[in-house]
Image (cartoon, rainbow, N blue to C red):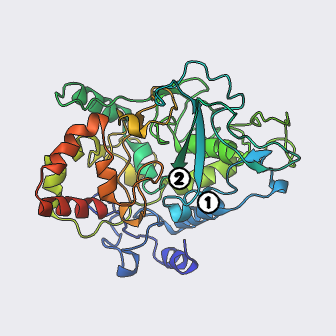
Amino acid sequence: MSRCLRLALLLWPVVSACGDGASATTPDATPDAPSSLIHASDVPIDGLSAADVAKFNDGDDLFDLPFLPGDGIGPLFVRTACGACHDEGGRGPGLVQKMAIVEPDGVTAAADQSALVYGHTIREGLSAGATIPLDPPDNPNVKVTIRVGPPVFGRGYIEAVDDAAIAAQETLQAGRTDGIHGVRNLTTFASVPNPDQTFETYKLGDPVVGRFGLKARIATLDDFAADAFQGDMGMTTPMRPTELPNPDNLTDDLRPGVDLDIDHVNRVAFYMRRIAIPKRVGQSDRGTALFAQVNCAACHVPAMHTRADYPIPQLAGIDAPIYTDLLLHDMGPALADGQTDGSATSTGWRTAPLIGLRFARTYLHDSRAQSVTEAVMAHAGEASGALQAFQALSADDQSLLIQYVEAL
């Protein structure tokens, strides 16, 4: 976030940046964002106190902080800061390369993944005496794919969605006759519990409903942060205290012990939980109708209801305009990556939240689509019927629908 914008937010702590009528406001909050903030992306939710805006900015700073060897980065790492993959809270520019052993069809994950001794993530950054990067083995059955860092806009809304609302979508879709049958990613909590139990009370190994990550394998934003610190930066935390295995068999880095304290994790999570959904402009009733008509809204559900007891009052008990069902869908072999995450298969992807799409320049998990139209045309598998319905529209209606999506 720019220094000028940050100062404006501190002086005016009731920014309204959520749009679509879904922004909750306090009684004395200013109802509309100033024109200078209509096109801002990385701003806090409406109605925060000045003290919470300051905490938001503190977390924003930590999110962009690049780590050095003396901070404990490595021994292997992908990027040096959260902001490298989510610049200004948005999409990319950083990316992660994944690898998997697949069957001869190039799609199905092989049962035997033992050739990937150190996991499925390529890590070429070296620190703390590491000399051997983690690259794909010389194996013709290794499939290498890209994942571009998704936006983190509105992630507090997503965390706040009631588990029951996600389950209800799964049940609703099970009765559909058009092949759209999303499923929850029923996975397990993989971290040491956070001593701060404000947002969750999960214990290591507890069953959870995933919602974060491109395959929805993580349930909470503090776990999301701890997982990224460990997996992408090699930074250990009390929630993820173990250095990842590496070819050099190094068990620590240049900062002995745990690299980041739990306060660091929670300050970053504070920021992510309160990033606004960017204000949506230029949408039309006709676009809304077309979005539903061609079944985009079946998976990109315009709103999901949040928990009444979510600890951030502005996000509790509301219809969150996140444009996702948070379910996994089979998107067809062309988008397969060979990866399995919990309930997610090689072709299975969580419905991408259509939040801040107007700030994106590339689309889909690997940036293969250079326009929203290209992204729509790449939909297959369960989305084949929706694609056919889009193609059956007149050229004018196709254009209106694309404009609607581009404004999200």
Residue type at tag 2: Gly
Circle 1 is placed at which residue position?
A: 84
Q: On the picture, is 253 further left or further right than 373?
A: right
Q: On the picture, is 296 further left or further right than 267?
A: left
Q: Quadrant of residue 347?
A: top left
**Pointer 2 or 1: first along the chain:** 1
Q: Quadrant of the C terminus?
A: bottom left
- Image position of 359 with respect to 111: above or below: below
Please indicate, yes or no, whether residue 295 appears anywhere in the rendered image: no
The residue closer to the viewer here, 151 or 303, is: 151
Q: Quadrant of the N terminus?
A: bottom right
Q: Residues within 10 Å of mark 1 (few under 14, many from 20)?
A: many
The residue closer to the viewer here, 352 or 265, is: 352
Residue type at tag 1: Ala
**Residue 8 percent location from the top left of the image:** 49, 79
The Cα–Cα distance between marks 2 and 1, rounded to whole angstroms, is 9 Å
Q: Which mark is residue 149?
A: 2
Residue depicted at 40% across the width and 70% down the height: 15
